[in-house]
Structure formats: C-alpha cells, structure tokens
Amino acid sequence: MPSVPKEIRTYCPYCRKHTVFKVKEYKAGKRRSTAWGQIKHELKTKGYTSKVAGKVGGIKNRKHIVLLLTCTECGKKRYKVLPETKKKLEIKR
C-alpha cells in the first residue's frame, strides 16, 4: 500500500513557484443525468430488468491512484497521478 504525506512541497503553475500543497485522494463526483452517455444508457436499459451487455474484457482490480493537490497560498487545485498501480492509498498524518 503506497503511503503519501499529508502535505507535499511541489511546483504551483499559478503561483509560479514551489509551495506547500495539501493532499487528498481524488474521488469521482456524482454523474450528470443530462449527459449524453447517461441518457443513452437509460434509453438502452429502459424496460429491461437485467443489465445490458457491454464489452467483454479482463477485470482490472488495480488502478493508478490520482491525488488532488490544493495550494496553501492561492487555493488552486491540481491533479497528480502516482506512477504505480495499487488498490489502496494511505495518507500519513
């Protein structure tokens, strides 16, 4: 399990200098019901009680972890993707 410190000192493109960033794990937000892909999926599944068949492929049980970094000076947010694939992330307190 990769462990990441609570605060990281890295470059901020908005401040144009190295600053301290607060670290959080990125979580996907709520899906929009008006998005075309969501409407298309609802139309496909309309009237069916079971799931609609999709693409057949291998199940991935690991993924690249995305960190959400927040600058302590300007408050702007940016993302950082960790190079290794892991199941969980531990943030050191």
Image: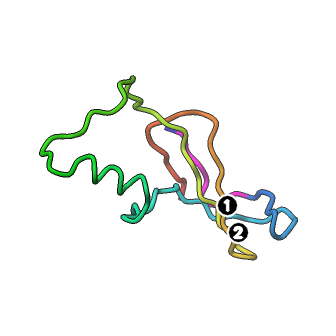
Assess disc 2: are there few (<14), some (14-19) or many (≥20) residues with their C-alpha within 10 Å of its C-alpha: many
The tag on residue 78 is 1
In percent of width and height, residue 51 lies at 21, 40
Mark 2 and mark 1: span between their CA atoms?
8 Å
Overall secondary structure of the magenta stretch? strand
Relative to 74, does residue 55 appear above or below in the rendering? above
Q: Which residue bears the numbered disc 2?
A: 71
Q: Residue at x 64, y 61 (%)?
A: 69
Residues 61 and 18: in front is: 61
In percent of width and height, residue 16 lies at 87, 66
Write down the region rendered in magenta: 2-8
Mark 2: secondary structure: strand
Q: Amino acid at mark 1?
A: Arg
Relative to 22, does residue 85 appear above or below in the rendering? above
The tag on residue 8 is none
Residues 71 and 92: in front is: 71
Relative to 44, does residue 29 appear above or below in the rendering? below
Assess disc 1: are there few (<14), some (14-19) or many (≥20) residues with their C-alpha within 10 Å of its C-alpha: few
- The residue most toward the right is 16
Q: Nearer the viewer, mark 2 or mark 1?
A: 1
Q: Residue at x 55, y 45 (%)?
A: 3
In percent of width and height, residue 1 lies at 49, 37
Residues 29 and 31: in front is: 31
Which of marks 1 and 2 precedes in the sequence?
2
Q: Amino acid at mark 2?
A: Cys
Q: Residue at x 74, y 76 (%)?
A: 74
Q: Quadrant of residue 30?
A: bottom left
